Image (spheres, helix red, strand yellow):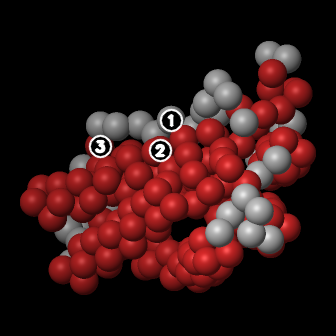
Amino acid sequence: MEFIDFRVPAQGFSQPLLLWTASHDRAQRVALLLQRLFEHLRQHGPSQATRVTAGEVRRFMDEAAPRHHQDEDVDLFPRLRRRLEAANGNAFDPAQAHETALTLDRLELDHPVLDDLWAQVRAALVHADSATPTDAHCACAEQFVGTFLAHHGVEDQIITPIAERALRQDDLAAIGDAMAARRGTTWSALSMR
């Protein structure tokens, strides 16, 4: 049985891009756990261990994933867009800036798709608390995991390196503060512990 680590990495909110990519690592592990869980449920049916694991996956996807999407949609992506527009060919090739903006558009469109798929997978997990999941449940879970991993892959491979170059320290501080507030804390409060 695996448990999901909900702790904030040591870098905390003072380095939001590190926190953001660390959350991708965690989310990808959860997605792969979900995939293994459905495989196990399909072969062996529900048990107390699968119920606990399913509860941990649901908790992560219900609590952490929506905040992560808000981090992107409300703070990170808009600030990155503004920096790319402000660079106006100085730090970034205009074609690269345009392509990055299109990639951000696609990533933002993925969020409601992932939310809808998660709602279906969540219902399948509730069903699997007491019965073997159906073929449709397993197919939905596979689609969710595939879409989820591809989404994070684009963010890690394309957006992260550009964000590291484009965002300034004041952008990062504002993003970190917003991420902390979204989680009901401040970085200064956490770093005093």
Against 61, residue 3 (above or below) is above
Residue 114's mark?
none
Q: Quadrant of the C terminus?
A: top right
Name the kind of residue labelled 3 in the image: Ala
Residue placed most toward the observer, 97 or 12: 97
Residue placed most toward the observer, 72 or 89: 89
Q: Which residue sits furthest left?
A: 43
Secondary structure under tag 1 reads loop
Q: Which of the two discs, 1 and 2, labels the residue nearer the N terminus? A: 1
Task: Tell me the crowding category of disc 1: few under 14, some 14 to 19, or many 20 or more residues within 10 angstroms, Cα based.
Answer: few
Residue 11 in which image quadrant: top right
Name the kind of residue labelled 1 in the image: Asp
Task: Tell me the crowding category of disc 2: few under 14, some 14 to 19, or many 20 or more residues within 10 angstroms, Cα based.
Answer: some
Residue sitting at x 86%, y 36% = 186
Proximity of marks 1 and 2: CB atoms separated by less than 8 Å = yes
Residue 163 rendering spot, x and y as whole percentages: 67, 54
Secondary structure under tag 2 reads helix
Q: Which residue is mark 2?
A: 26
**Looking at the image, can residue 186 be seen?**
yes
**Number of marks drawn:** 3
Residue 5's mark?
1
Residue sitting at x 62%, y 56% = 162
Give the Cα distance between marks 1 and 2: 8 Å
Q: Which residue is mark 3?
A: 49
Residue sitting at x 43%, y 60% = 153
Foreground mark, 3 or 1, reads 1
Name the kind of residue labelled 2 in the image: Arg
Secondary structure under tag 3 reads helix
Q: Which of the two discs, 3 and 1, labels the residue nearer the N terminus? A: 1
Query: Does 184 sit left or right of 122 as displayed?
Result: right
Give the Cα distance between marks 3 and 1: 17 Å
